[in-house]
Amino acid sequence: MKKAFFWIILIMLLAGSAAAANGHILQDIRPLELVKAATPPVLDGSLDDVAWKNAAVVDDPWITFNPVNGNELPQRTRAYLAYDDQNLYFAFHCLDSSPDQIKTSLTKRDGIFEDDWVGLSLDTVGGKKYGYELFVNPSGVQADAFRTGDMEDSSTDWVWYSAGKVVADGYIVEIRQPLKNIRFASGKDVRMGVVFWRRVSRLGMSGSWPHLVPGQSIGGSQAEVRIAELSRPLVLEALPSFTYTSGWDRLTPTAWSGANQTRDLGFTLKYGITSSIVAEATLNPDFSQVESDAMQVTVNQRYPVLYSEKRPFFMEAGNLFDLGGVGDGLGNMALPVHTRAVVDPQWGLRLTGEQGRGSFALLASADRSPGNPWDGEENPDLGRMATYWIGRGKLGLGTDNYVGLLYSGREFGEEYNRALAADFSFRFLKNHQLMGNYIQSFSNRPDAGGENDGGYLTAEYAFSKGNSAVLAMVEDIAPGFQMDTAYFQRSGITAAKFYLQHRFVPDAKKLPWLLGFTPTVYGAVIRDKVSGMDDTELMFEARANFILKGQLAGYHYLGQECWAGRAFQRSTAQLSVNLQPFKWLNLHSCYGFGNAIYYDPVDPFLGHRTQFHANFTLQPTKNLNLFAEHSRSRFRRPESGEKVYDQGIWRGRLTYQFNPKLFVRGLVQYDTFYQRVLGDFLASFTYIPGTVIYLGYGSLNENQSWNGGGWQRGVTGDRYYQTRQSLFFKVSYRYQF
């Protein structure tokens, strides 16, 4: 421990004494007065339209925010803004001294982040709390995300239009954002906020206008946009959908079951009550999961694996339910509202909006899964549904400070779980921030202990200035705390955690290939209230960023972990590397080793674990993309070296993108531990988000043996059987009045 404290003090001294290598770069941050376009620009990757000649222009240097904050982005960028009664317009001329090195591709929506890209964050109500984020690569392919504070949700898709083209001196991107597809405050003298940003892939650098100042939020850094007048558009949408699935199971080595077919009709209606308040209702919604969950290492995991939401209705602006102090990776709770808890919805309602300094989001849904039939026995709750009721409100307190409330409840007959939360976020003295929340839960489980309640308190302090960052957090969670909609790891603990980071920026003239070196220290003490035992964690990490998107990182972790009434001393290390040696090839690999607990509730023990992961992305043409990865986790007993488990995941995905709307994809995943192979093939056409056609085929192969009367899995020396196959078809149409 003496050595540990020595390194902590040394890094703190270096962080305090090191001066940033960045010079002062001038940006003319000013209100942008938009000029109304008499004729809409044509989205063709050209800036010859009259609208761009009269547009507001930003032609300042852009300043890097990743991986180093404060340098001038080497390639210049010009941004243009205009509007008319129906749309907002943006254009970018991204100058590049080596246009042949621009990385671009034809890929599906949200798949552009290995490419060069340019885009913006648009705060449509000027409240500095939310932002619509739009990104476009040089081929015109889109990505988007919805931001709350500084947290981004990339699962949200809305309708907007773009074009891109590589030209002799770089590339040009044009964007048209229909007003009816975003929420804003209509009327005279409309104020919005904007941040522009650009990624130069081969340099591994991202820059922005205005400068994203450390210690300030994205909203706090934005420039003001002024529009003389915007009328309220009609927001009325209907989205019918049809989904057909058919599945077959192998009964014997030579016989299959009959087709298990389902046909679902769904309908969703959206109406804009005002320009900033929208209501949605859906009956038998289309919750089909087109993209399969990636196989993950699941053997000997202390906590359940978190899978992201992939269902359209829940994905839209799902991060509106985030809480202050949650989701930054340090806390015990990852999501206060994880909508995959609603397994099989029958209907859904949502109301979201902004009014003055306030904002709100309401979500309700009925889940059929608790009343679905069980295999092999009778479900006593057959046919009954659980209902979820979730409400969120925020009140802005100037800049990007706020206070908020959240209610989350699940009702199922006499059984219920209800949680009420209050949270806040407050920035002060430019570089300091306080965040926190308190959640009180009330539960009744007639079949599992009856009534119970408990609280969850989180308080967090953050400081960021220049290239230094400090974060400290405390958590207190009662043993009786329960929250059915949340994803969190443990209850009944008190924890204190800290995080310290400083980035050293070398002289670019002396070391042009090295962008920055960043050491980090993390520590935590976690008291288990039930056992009275303490977990301790201390981690030292260092990361170096290079050109060609290169990164070399490593960490050493040591501490005490308690499990099943016993304390285990742990020490692990990991090394990882990322590199883009060519614009058509991305590489990643990491290797970790050390001791770990085998989580047997009766007889846990400390063993030796190694973990390995590697992947590559190969893009020989703009249309073709090959992704392959391998993950492996091995565990051995310390004395004998006997293997306890060895789980490997192999995954390959081949995608051919005919154009930004149409692609075909083949996916194969193999799990060596469970000895199963999953094949997944998909053809997808997306005209706009919501207007889609999908056709898919899935196949599951497992290592099994037939003993004449039934299946035996994992018998050595036997063969793989195709145990299940399925067909999938979905069509939906988004009609906007």
Image: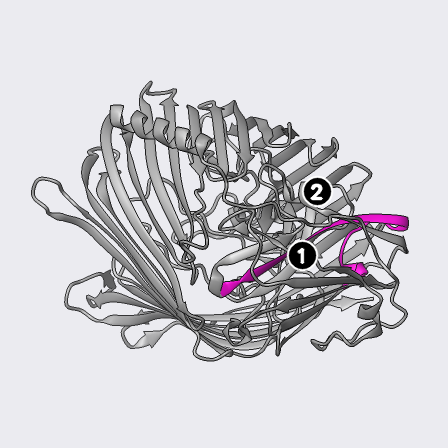
Instruction: Note whether 608 is above or below 156 in the view shown.
Output: above
Name the quarter where the C terminus is drawn.
bottom right
Q: Which residue is mark 1?
A: 120
Where is residue 555 drawn, in percent x and y?
31, 42
Mark 2 falls on what kind of element?
strand
State the residue in front, 685 or 366. 685
State the residue in front, 571 or 76. 76
Where is residue 696 drawn, in percent x and y?
50, 74
Task: Identify the mark nearer the N-term, 2 or 1.
Answer: 1
Distance of mark 2 from mark 1, alpha carbons?
27 Å
User: In terms of image quadrants, where is residue 676?
Assistant: bottom left
Mark 1 closeness class: few <14, some 14–19, many ≥20 residues within 10 Å: many
In the image, the segment drawn in magenta is 177-201
User: In terms of image quadrants, where is residue 594?
Assistant: top left
State the residue in front, 341 or 66. 66
Name the quarter where the N terminus is drawn.
top left
In the image, is 476 to the left or to the right of 87? left
Give residue 362's mark.
Answer: 2
Q: Residue at x 21, y 54 (%)?
A: 646
Does residue 328 appear in the picture of this structure? yes
> Which is closer to the viewer, label 2 or label 1?
1
Q: Main secondary structure of the magenta part?
A: strand
